[in-house]
Image (cartoon, grey):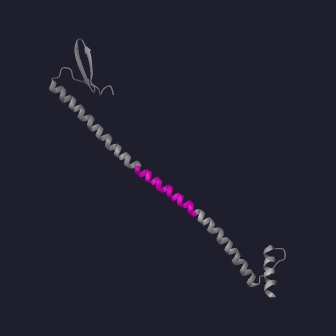
Amino acid sequence: MGGDAVQTSARDGEAADDVGGECLAGLTPEQRLDAIEQRLRRGADRIAALENGLATNTQLTTEIRELLEFGRNGLRLLGHLGVVMRWAGGIAAAVSAMVGLWHAVRSGVPVDSGDVLSAVVQAYRDGSQK
């Protein structure tokens, strides 16, 4: 940033001013003011462009953050649905086993003597025939 500052150095007894790499020595006071004002306008334009770029960057960053938050919440919801589905699957398996047992008992499926399920079905049949 050494070129952006006004520097005054002594050369052979003369004072030389340097603004942004532009030598202002030998200019009339009006020309010097015009040169400084032009440099200030260019600096203001650069600052305005940087501010616009920063505003655009901030807006994009906010949108990306919202999108990531939405995705994180969606994954959290899927996790909760997975827990519910795991419980529902266990309940469905238990209900289907009970329905299968009830159907086997009611329909008179032949019973093998080496199976625990067969022993339960046989015990139920023996109790209902009395």
Outermost residue toward the right in this view: 113
The residue that appears at 72% across and 80% down in the rendered structure is 102
User: Where does residue 48 sit, x and y in percent of width and height?
Assistant: 29, 40
Question: In the picture, which quadrant includes the N terminus?
Answer: top left
Outermost residue toward the top in this view: 12
Question: In the picture, which quadrant includes the C terminus?
Answer: bottom right
Left or right of 99 on screen, residue 19: left
Q: Indicate the quadrant where residue 26 lies.
A: top left
Name above or below for residue 88 compared with residue 33: below
Name above or below for residue 87 compared with residue 44: below
User: Where does residue 41 sit, x and y in percent of width and height?
Assistant: 23, 35
Determine the main secondary structure of the stretch shown in magenta. helix
Whether residue 77 is in magenta: the answer is yes
User: Where does residue 13 sit, x and y in percent of width and height?
Assistant: 22, 12
Outermost residue toward the bottom in this view: 130
Q: Nearer the viewer, residue 42 or 7?
A: 7
Q: Indicate the quadrant where residue 106 lies.
A: bottom right
Left or right of 65 on screen, residue 90: right
Name above or below for residue 128 compared with residue 21: below
The residue that appears at 70% across and 74% down in the rendered structure is 97
Q: Which residues are magenta?
A: 62-81
Q: Nearer the viewer, residue 129 or 18?
A: 129
The residue that appears at 15% across and 27% down in the rendered structure is 30
Left or right of 44 on screen, residue 113: right
How many labels sit on residues? Answer: 0
User: Where does residue 51 sit, x and y in percent of width and height?
Assistant: 32, 42
Q: Indicate the quadrant where residue 23 lies.
A: top left
The residue that appears at 23% across and 19% down in the rendered structure is 16
Name above or below for residue 55 compared with residue 82: above
Whether residue 68 is in magenta: the answer is yes
